[in-house]
Amino acid sequence: MSDIIIKAEHLSKVYKIYERDIDRLKETFHPFHKRYSKDFYALNDVSFEIRRGENVGLVGKNGAGKSTLLKLITGVLTPTSGTIEVNGRIASLLELGAGFNPELTGVENIYMNGLLMGQSRQVMDAKIDNIIAFADIGQFISQPVKTYSSGMFARLAFAVNAFVEPDILIIDEALSVGDAFFQSKCIDKMRSMISSGVTILFVSHDTFAVKNLCKRAFLLQSGKIIMDDTAKNVIQTYRNMMVAAHHDDETSNAADTLEDFLARIKNYQQNQHDDFTPPKITAENILRGKDIFDKNAAYNRTQNGRANFLNVQLLNSHGESISEVAFAQTVVLRMVVKLNENIPLLGMGYHIRNSTGIDLIYTDSRFNGMKAIFNGKRGEVYIIDWQFKVTLRQELYDIACVISIPTDESMTAADICDFVPCALQFNAVSPNPYMNLLGGYVNWHNDLTITKFLATKE
């Protein structure tokens, strides 16, 4: 079996562009074959090789040729010139609803797509429950897909393509229409597919997702691959291009930009010195939103039954559950924990993860003066409040929560009582657009001193 799974040589896709509709007819029947059209190269003389198990990201501005390239690889389009060779079974999410018969139900479309992918009825029988559970669209799975929303299309399409065991998985921004929790599930599934050797081609405007999921990336511009390198290097080059373009666009409005920037600084300084009052604890508010927590927590949850989370909330100073956090806003992460047996020592912690599952922040009771639950009794319920200031770049984040019992004196090993990979999600909102173009994830606190020093005369 060849190690090369996709090979393109001098690949081009050309479209004819007409100024008027009548020009198409005139060109077709002109006796001397006069041209009334101009050639538009959606893809222009592209060559590359992708090996089995590689995960490659495609980045570039709209119209750069990313989607055209994927459609040529999948066979949706035929090249104008050049060749494309694919050695493996492809599963692709290029356009919502592609490959679905709108008159068939979700279940019927699952079987139909499986057959198109070369899977027998018996094989699909073994996979159907996992696909339905992952898609999680409830009773709509038995309804015609023409009644589905775009989010339902995305859920079902990804579930089918992920579980038919493809050699190549191609995704072109299709996950952006799904809800935030489902996107996290998809990223987690893609990671497991990468570890099993599946080749993944991933198109997204989320450069952090590309960098974290892919080791290699192509940068496309005007139908050409202008850079083929590590994802880290390609993303940095792409960001530099975007920053330069943004600077050019803003040059004519420099005064307005400065005014807006000063206003953001003032707002930031006010937020830095806000007075925060911890939210009150009542029997009613600690279980607010529990139904949503239970649904999110069910995915990949790990429990041993000794203690468990009843609820997890993200609260503002008014005790309101929030899903959007302003830059530098102080919040409380509230955990509601129930003990199911007597436990002498129970520790707790949380992770804040980006949309691709990378841990950006982690803390637990060992880092906080060993605050823990001591000599807990069966049936007791504890409220654990973590108060912190959010200084993250604008993006969607997951919070994973864990409670555990230390199993050695050094407290470096523990028995996990309950681990919830996605207890809740929140959007961080940044006041500074430049931070979203340039920076990392966390705005580190600094005590900054600037001293004017007059040099001596030479």
Image (cartoon, rainbow, N blue to C red):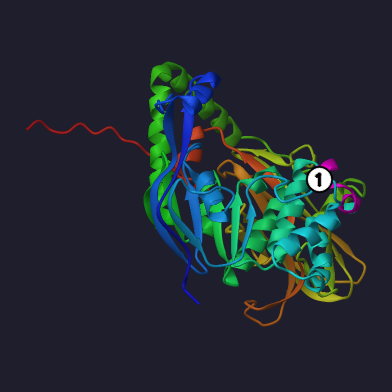
| Image coords of residue 213 (percent x, y) | 54, 58
Secondary element at image label 1: loop
Residue 410 located left or right of residue 257: right
User: In the rendered view of the protein, which quadrant contains the C terminus?
Assistant: top left
Looking at the picture, does residue 18 appear above or below residue 347? above
Q: Which class describes the residues within 10 Å of circle 1: few (<14), some (14-19), or many (20+)?
A: some
| Image coords of residue 327 (percent x, y) | 59, 38
Residue 309 seen anywhere in this rendered image of the structure:
yes
Q: Residue at x 67, y 36 (%)?
A: 275
Looking at the picture, does residue 196 appear above or below residue 55? below
| Image coords of residue 264 (percent x, y) | 53, 27
Which span of residues is magenta-colored?
Answer: 139-148
**Residue type (three-letter) at the residue carrying disc 1:** Pro
Principal SS element in the magenta part? helix
Q: Which residue is mark 1?
A: 102
Residue 388 seen anywhere in this rendered image of the structure:
no
Q: Residue at x 69, y 43 (%)?
A: 177
